[in-house]
Image (cartoon, rainbow, N blue to C red):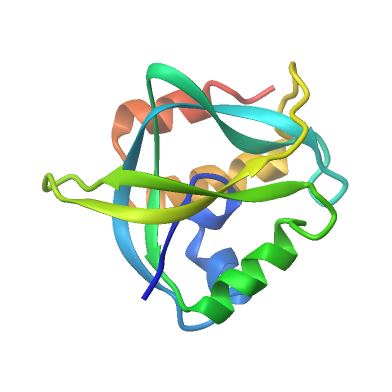
Amino acid sequence: MPHYFAYGSNLSSRQMLLRCPGASAIGPARLTDYELAFTRPSRRWGGYAADVVPAVGSLVWGVAWEVTPMHLQQLDRYEGVAIAAYRRRDVHVTLPGGGSLHAITYAVVDPQDGGRPSPRYLHTILEGAREHRLPGDWIRHLAALAP
C-alpha cells in the first residue's frame, strides 16, 4: 500500500478520515531538508495553506499514513492537483524508531512568500500534531505561528 506524509490540516485524523475513510495512521514522521511554509492563499481556510519547501538542514514533522491508490486520488482532488494548486512529491520520511518510508506528499505549484495561516487552519494543524504526539519543540514552533 502507498504511504502519504501529512504536514498540514491532514495531520488531524478527524479531517483525514473524512477525506480518506479507512486510511491508517502509521505515526509521527520527519521530512528532512524541507521547511514548513505557508505559500498558497486558501479560500477554504482563509489565510495561507501549508507547503513544504526544500531547505537543506531543516526538517518538518508530520504523520505518515497508509493509504490506498483510491485515497491518493481523493487527496489529489482535495489538494487541487487538477487545477495546479498542489502537485504530488515523492519523499522519504524517517520514523522515530529509525526506519524510513517512501511517501507521497503535496507541494504548492506556484508558491507565494509571506503568507500566514488563519487561526482556524492553524488550530486544525495543532490538533493533529498533539493528537499524534509530534515532538514538543515542533508543537511549540507551530503554536508560535499564531497571529
Position of 110 compared to 107: left or right?
right
The answer to whether residue 55 is left or right of residue 102 is right
Q: Residue at x 15, y 50 (%)?
A: 99
* Vertical comparison of 81 with 108: above or below: below
**As drawn, is 77 to the left or to the right of 124?**
right
What is the x, y in percent for residue 64? 37, 57
Q: Where is residue 40, by image quadrant?
A: top right
Q: Which residue sits at x=56%, y=75%?
A: 71
Decide: is 103 above or below 89: below
Name the residue: 32% across, 39% down.
Answer: 30
Q: Is residue 11 left or right of residue 109?
A: left
- Farthest residue toward the front? 90
Q: How many marks?
A: 0
Name the image quarter holding the N terminus: bottom left
Q: Is residue 9 shown above or below 53?
A: below
Spot the residue most to the left.
97
Foreground of the two, 59 or 11:
59
**Residue at 56% across / 45% down in the picture?**
8
Picture coordinates of residue 144, whole percent (x, y): 53, 21
Dividing the image into 4 quarters, which one contains the C terminus? top right
Q: Where is residue 107 in the image (x, y as percent from the top left)?
A: 62, 41
The front one of 16 and 82 is 82
Report the front residue among 103 and 30.
103
| Quadrant hosting residue 31 | top left
